[in-house]
Image (cartoon, rainbow, N blue to C red):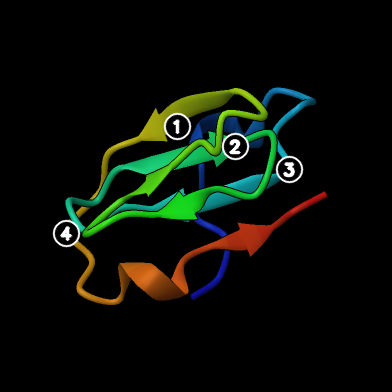
Amino acid sequence: MSQPELPGQNLPEWVSWIAQDASGSWWGFEAEPNQGHNFWYENEVGRCVKLMDAADNLKWKDSLKKIR
């Protein structure tokens, strides 16, 4: 899965990882996130921000991408 088309592509400078949850929500993370049951979560060593909502993604585990 490629990087999502985000509104304006203006991510905060600190976002180094992006990932989508099973529910379709895209998140930006400062540090590599941990994988939960059907979502990604920050690993207590960085910030996270919700980027946008999209359609459910059955292949959400394949969405994690390092962008910086």
Say which element carries label 4: loop
Disc 2 from disc 3: Cα separation: 6 Å
Q: Nearer the viewer, mark 3 or mark 4?
A: 3
Labels 4 & 2 near each other (Cβ < 8 A):
no
Q: Position of residue 48 (x, y in %)?
A: 53, 27
- Determine crowd level at label 3: few under 14, some 14-19, many 20+ residues with C-alpha closer than 10 A: some
Q: CA distance from mark 3 to mark 4?
A: 23 Å
**Residue denoted by label 3:** 16
Q: Quick one: label 2, few (<14), some, or many (20+) residues within 10 Å?
A: many
Q: CA distance from mark 3 to mark 1?
A: 13 Å
Q: Earlier in the sequence, mark 2 or mark 3?
A: 3
Rendered view: 20 above or below 29:
below
Number of dots carrying numbers: 4
User: For this view, does 58 lie left or right of residue 42?
Assistant: left
> What amino acid does circle 4 point to?
Asp
Q: Earlier in the sequence, mark 1 or mark 4?
A: 1
* Left or right of 31 on screen, residue 8: left
Pinpoint residue 61: horizontal percent, then vertical percent: 38, 71
Task: Estimate the spatial distance between the alpha carbons at disc 1 and disc 4, rounded to whole Å.
Answer: 15 Å
Q: Earlier in the sequence, mark 2 or mark 1?
A: 2
Residue at far front of view: 44
Residue 26 coordinates in the image, percent (x, y): 39, 44
Whether residue 18 sits left or right of residue 54 in the image: it is right
Closest to the camera, between mark 4 and mark 2, is 2
The disc, 3 or 1, on the residue closer to the chain's N-terminal end is 3
Residue type, label 2: Phe
Q: Amino acid at mark 1?
A: Leu
Measured in 3D between alpha carbons, the distance from the residue under mark 4 to the one under mark 2, in whole angstroms, is: 20 Å
Q: Residue drawn at (63%, 37%), measured in percent from left and top?
A: 9
According to the picture, the residue beneath numbered tag 2 turns out to be: 29
Q: Which residue is mark 4?
A: 56
Q: Which residue is mark 1?
A: 51
